[in-house]
Image (cartoon, grey):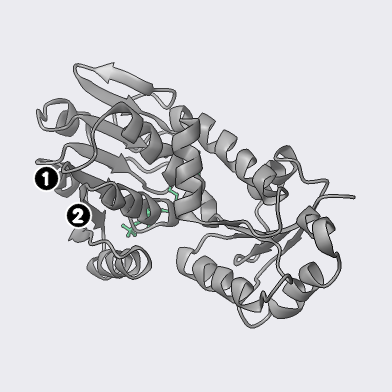
């Protein structure tokens, strides 16, 4: 029986990245729907849960993606609400690679050093990846600050993380390089989660900072999020500071993403969100 993966994307176009990884993760056929909302998703879910019975059902699965974390979470909840009794299929949430990227980055940090009790700053932490990274770091017991160029976005992201994960993260406005340099002054861990091609932190602001022990950056396109590192760094030691660049994290991210897709087809009851994906990331790291 063919393994069918349905991508429900909250964006106007279905993610090419998610489509490719879905095939690489073991799907035989990937069908994507764009601009899906909680209002329109009902009949799509019905098509997945009423068509195959018993063990055959595990060959159908749903992946929720798109560039907006809040919309992705709402859609994911709406899909789950449609399930009842045995009428369910495995589902995964990974808006903009949020869960898999943040989980891979934080798992590599957790494997390399202590997170509990450390001061962590997630730079530009208002996007899908940054919000998930902030939540996972806080769940590991770090004291987390999340920065944004806008107070409203920082506050909203911190509130959303607290609502979803029950952990507190501190919102902080940092509009430019100098402000972000100040934001990491007391930090032990820096996680740069800015948009592609955006530099967030100058070399002098981390290399001369004795408090910083570990840094991670998920932006792979030059200029990198953290000046003075290499995208390929994977636990590279810069005078006692361990650094993970976007490609250093990306290897585990892709392995994890593919592993999650494989897992979706192992039962019809899988629910893969941040917690489950992070657990798998720690096993794989
Ligand atoms: P995003 O939503 O596109 O951007 C994150 C935040 O960056 C935004 O919320 C914004 O924060 C800030 N930002 C945007 N333009 C900026 C600028 N010019 N200067 C300073 N800050 C700026 O990012 P995402 O989807 O969460 O992804 C985060 C990063 O992970 C991206 O670089 C993406 O390419 C990367 N990624 C990596 C992998 C991997 O495997 N390595 C996988 C997936 C994604 P404010 O407006 O609040 O300041």
Residue 283, how many percent across, how many down?
48, 34
Query: To which residue does mark 1 refer?
Result: 182
Residue drawn at 9 percent across, 41 percent down: 186
Query: To which residue does mark 2 refer?
Result: 174
- Mark 1 residue crowding within 10 angstroms, few (<14) / some (14–19) / many (20+): few
User: Which of the pair 12/70 is nearer the observer?
Assistant: 70
Q: Quadrant of the C terminus?
A: top left
Mark 1 and mark 2 in contact? Answer it, CB < 8 Å: yes
198 left or right of 173 in image: right
Q: Quadrant of residue 6?
A: bottom right
Residue 46, how many percent across, how many down?
77, 75
User: Which of the pair 276/124 is nearer the observer?
Assistant: 276
- Per the rendering, the mark at residue 8 is none
* N-term-proximal mark, 1 vs 2: 2
Q: Quadrant of residue 149?
A: bottom left
Residue drawn at 32 percent across, 35 percent down: 110
Residue 74, how many percent across, how many down?
52, 73
Residue 177: tell me if it is visible: no
Residue drawn at 26 percent across, 29 percent down: 113
């Amino acid at each position: 029986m063919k393994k069918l993966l349905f991508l429900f994307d909250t964006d106007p176009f279905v993610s090419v990245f998610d489509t490719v990884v879905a095939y690489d993760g073991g799907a035989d056929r990937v069908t994507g729907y764009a601009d899906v909302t909680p209002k329109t998703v009902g009949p799509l879910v019905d098509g997945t849960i009423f068509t195959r019975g018993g063990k055959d059902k595990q060959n159908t699965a749903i992946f929720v993606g798109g560039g907006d974390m809040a919309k992705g979470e709402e859609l994911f909840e709406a899909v789950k609400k449609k399930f009842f009794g045995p009428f369910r299929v495995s589902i995964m949430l990974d808006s903009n690679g949020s869960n898999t990227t943040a989980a891979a980055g934080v798992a590599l940090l957790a494997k390399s050093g202590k997170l509990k009790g450390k001061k962590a700053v997630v730079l530009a932490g208002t996007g899908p990846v940054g919000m998930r990274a902030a939540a996972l770091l806080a769940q590991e017991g770090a004291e987390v600050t999340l920065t944004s160029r806008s107070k409203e976005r920082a506050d909203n992201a911190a509130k959303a993380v607290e609502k979803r994960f029950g952990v507190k993260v501190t919102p902080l406005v940092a509009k430019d390089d100098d402000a972000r340099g100040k934001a990491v002054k007391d930090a032990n861990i820096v996680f740069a989660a800015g948009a592609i091609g955006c530099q967030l932190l100058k070399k002098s602001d981390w290399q001369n900072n004795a408090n910083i022990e570990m840094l991670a950056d998920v932006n792979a396109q030059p200029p990198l999020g953290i000046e003075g590192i290499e995208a390929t760094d994977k636990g590279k030691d810069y005078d006692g500071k361990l650094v993970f660049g976007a490609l250093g994290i990306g290897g585990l991210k892709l392995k994890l993403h593919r592993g999650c897709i494989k897992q979706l087809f192992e039962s019809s009851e899988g629910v893969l969100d941040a917690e489950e994906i992070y657990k798998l990331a720690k096993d794989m790291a």
